[in-house]
Amino acid sequence: MKKFWWQDTIIYQVYLRSFQDSNGDGIGDLNGVISRLDYLKDLGVDTLWISPHYDSPMDDNGYDVRDFYKVSEDYGTIEDFKNLLNEAHKRNMKIITDLVLNHTSDEHPWFEAAKDPNHPEHEKYHDFYIWQPPKHDKNGRRMMPTRWKSWFGGPVWQYNEATDEYYLHIFSKKMPDLNWRNKTMREELKTMIKWWVDLGVDGFRVDASNHLEKNWDFPDGHPGYEHFSSLPKHHEYLEELGREIFRPNNLLVIGEAGGASREEALQYAGFDTTEFDMLIQFEHCWVDTDDDNELTPGKWAKGTVDVTKIKQSFNHWHDVFKENGWNTVYWHNHDQPRIVSHYGDDAQYHNRSAKMLLYTLYFLPGTPIVYFGEEIGMTNVDYQKLDDFKDVEVFTEYDNFMNNGASHEVAMQALRDRSRDNARSPMQWNDSKYAGFSNSAPWMPVNGNYETINVQRQLNEKDSIFNHFKKVLQTRKKDALAHGTVEFYDIDHPQSFNYKVSTDNVEYLVLANFKDQKLTMELPESIAAYKLYLSNMKTDANALEFEPYEARVYRRKK
Ligand code: GLC
Ligand code: CA
């Protein structure tokens, strides 16, 4: 078994804009993160993944980079960034940053030159992006090159008058896609990546990494995702980065690549390949869609949570990486709803279901990624007005719902259930106005439940979600559960979530009822050898009946 520092680390994702404001402008920032390092250390976290901190017009909260070498004024200065690295390293913590390589902002100087034939450097930069001439219908009217659909809802093509061409953007129109076939462009990105490595970052999360290559024949199709997702050639680009930069520098590099097959996953993150160290895929993140919903289709349609699918997915990924790579365990990131609202219950069973989700995930082998606020069971937003939402995706999709015939109420409910903004409202530190996130109105409203769900309150309650979190993370470390193996019981059962994790020295048994109805289970015969280690309610260790969302963790030494 290979050994790397990141196998035993616990990662925590900080959505920078919403974590902690330090200067009263209502926007989270780097100094805010520094002020919370001790809190995170106490929780048991040792690596932070920071969402994009680069200069940006913030069309997509920083995933639209204007200057890769500059820290956004919203977030601080390069001195603040160095300070964050220093302060983290002093505490034996690591910092990994988001690396956005698929696109830039349309305000990036490269694109400014690319779109303007009169720009002195037009020649060089035009080919940094992806352009196609218009098509024309039989009446001579201009048409887009294809009907491909962007991930944010509209078309992928935007017309540029000055060159009479369309440019490709698979996300928002302010995020033109880079042309990875252009070697000069790749060299410039590599120089940039090395610059951050030299500054001292400990690794990266590579954004949208499976989209770097496109089908340059531009065949028509709708939505056409297969023409800009997971095309074989993108591995060549990643391999080049891995070989030249990632591997030689002992970095932790996590790739974002939804929908990867077993073979592909090993190509990305197997021990024998040089691309990434770990993978983020989204297989378990949307097991509750409803394909028949026409008003709010796709991820926006709420169906019942398919517990079997979650277990099968966890089991599958454990199996993929158990010998020849390394697994990651996480519920979600800044692109999915809050887990307690999504797969648990954020009302009557808030506390109990949040702990159930904690036990069912965090005893699994691999490296965990905790999403900020998960440790106190933060919930989906309660926004009533459309303009409380901020995500660029929300507004195109709202229009789509209305065009499909949805009422305003139905559209708003879909946003409260499924939009990315659910995971982006400000961190709830205490019960003061603005929840201790800021002392002025935050860039996005604080969730109305901050007076009951907040860090300060949970620090003081022995049995809080936070304190259970802390205990589970300590347990992982103490018993090196990252290196364990897992065995699921009754994997096809639609309601139970039962598994055993073993290391050389210890075994944990997690038994959980994943639903809001009672469940009678058969306990494994070996149960007598175990001791009840944790539970999310007062319970009898031998009771066969499980209350809604009841979960228990048993332990035995080998
Ligand atoms: C990734 C990010 C998402 C962003 C997109 C474009 O999927 O996680 O937040 O909008 O890439 O950069
Ligand atoms: Ca600020």
Image: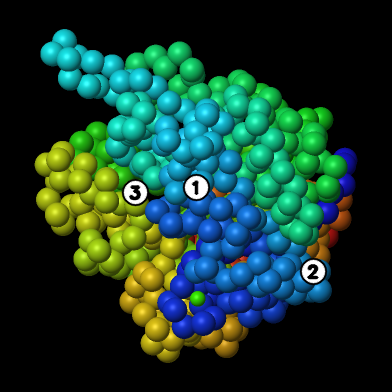
Task: Name the quadrant containing residue 199.
Answer: bottom right
From mark 2 to mark 3, how far is it between C-alphas? Answer: 36 Å
Q: Residue at x 39, y 75 (%)?
A: 442
- Residue 462, given in percent of the width and then of the height, sits at 60, 84
Question: Mark 3 or mark 1, which is nearer the start of the sequence?
Answer: 1
Instruction: Kindly identify which residue carries mark 3.
Output: 393
Q: Residue at x 66, y 39 (%)?
A: 188
State left or right for residue 51 relative to residue 253. Answer: left
Q: Secondary structure at mark 1?
A: loop
Query: Measured along the vertical axis of the image, is residue 122 above or below residue 374?
Result: above
Labelled disc at residue 108:
1
Viewer-nearest residue: 440 or 357: 440
Query: Is ligand 1 less than 8 Å from the beta carbon at label 1?
Result: no
Mark 1 or 2, which is nearer the eye?
A: 1
Q: Residue at x 61, y 70 (%)?
A: 77
State left or right for residue 38 relative to residue 250. Answer: left
